[in-house]
Image (spheres, rainbow, N blue to C red):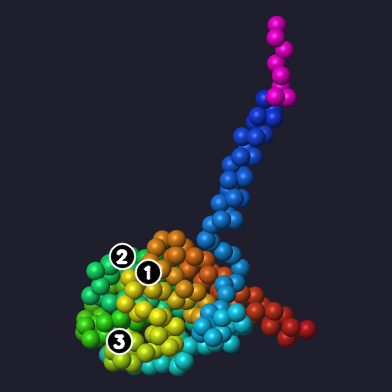
């Protein structure tokens, strides 16, 4: 009777288990997802230097209620800045992507979405109101999803000079702004970009909690 070579089979089983693990490590290293604190973004002249000092300039625009809304209302909040128009052919797809983000953080008052119209001459408060009412029905807090419009030249100037967007009429652009009013991420309109966006929101949110805990701990001692 032929003797079974168990060592050979054990080695083969080991290889079969190790192969998927090696693939996971390889794709994890090559993938676009990143963990830890997202980096800061600043003007071109600051690239290569410390961009953490750059903050969005103060702004006031008009929301879907026809009321002034601006940076003062966003202090201390983490927010997604989205740039599109309801007249865009891909507005439905942009909305779908943002709804995923919105739904995940629907119970978090400190995390919000602010859309900026890229065609404010078409996106009047009257046009935007029905849209934002539909989007906010998922949220616990009122008016968590804002859509801003205003004078075209003012808005386009702020998008270029404040958010550092070169082409405001691209397919879709998203920016992440932290609780200090600093740019922390830039994303396109894909599922992978939205996953990265939500990872970055979670990372910033976690870092805020750690900072608060450390300050409280230091105060006690």
Identified at 47% across, 92% down, the residue is: 57
Identified at 65% across, 31% down, the residue is: 13
Q: Which mark is residue 149?
A: 3
Q: Which mark is residue 127?
A: none
What's drawn in magenta, residue-wise? Answer: 1-8
Q: Position of residue 70 (x, y in %)?
A: 40, 90
Q: Secondary structure at mark 3?
A: loop
| Cα–Cα gap, marks 2 and 1 | 9 Å
7 within the magenta span: yes
Residue 79 horizontal side relative to residue 69, left or right: right
Q: Earlier in the sequence, mark 2 or mark 3?
A: 2
| Cα–Cα gap, marks 3 and 1 | 18 Å
Instruction: List the residue tagged with mark 2.
Output: 93
Q: Earlier in the sequence, mark 2 or mark 1?
A: 2
Q: Position of residue 15 (x, y in %)?
A: 65, 35
Image quadrant in which the N terminus is located: top right
Give the quarter of the image for residue 167: bottom left
Image quadrant in which the C terminus is located: bottom right
């Amino acid at each position: 009777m032929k003797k079974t070579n168990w060592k050979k089979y054990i080695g083969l089983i080991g290889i079969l288990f190790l192969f998927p693990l090696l693939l996971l490590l390889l794709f994890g290293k090559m993938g676009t997802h990143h963990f830890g604190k997202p980096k800061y973004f600043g003007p071109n002249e600051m690239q290569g230097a410390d961009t953490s000092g750059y903050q969005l300039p103060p702004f006031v625009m008009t929301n879907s209620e026809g009321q002034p809304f601006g940076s003062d209302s966003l202090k201390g909040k983490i927010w997604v800045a989205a740039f599109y128009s309801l007249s865009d052919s891909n507005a439905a797809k942009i909305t779908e992507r943002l709804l995923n983000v919105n739904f995940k953080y629907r119970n978090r008052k400190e995390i919000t979405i602010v859309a900026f119209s890229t065609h404010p001459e078409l996106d009047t408060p009257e046009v935007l109101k029905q849209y934002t009412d539909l989007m906010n029905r998922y949220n616990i807090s009122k008016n968590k999803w804002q859509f801003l419009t205003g004078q075209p030249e003012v808005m386009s100037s702020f998008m270029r000079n404040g958010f550092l967007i070169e082409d405001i009429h691209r397919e879709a652009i998203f920016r992440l702004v932290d609780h200090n009013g600093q740019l922390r991420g830039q994303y396109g309109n894909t599922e992978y970009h939205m996953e990265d966006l939500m990872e970055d929101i979670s990372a910033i949110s976690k870092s805020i909690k750690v900072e608060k805990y450390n300050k409280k701990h230091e105060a006690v001692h």
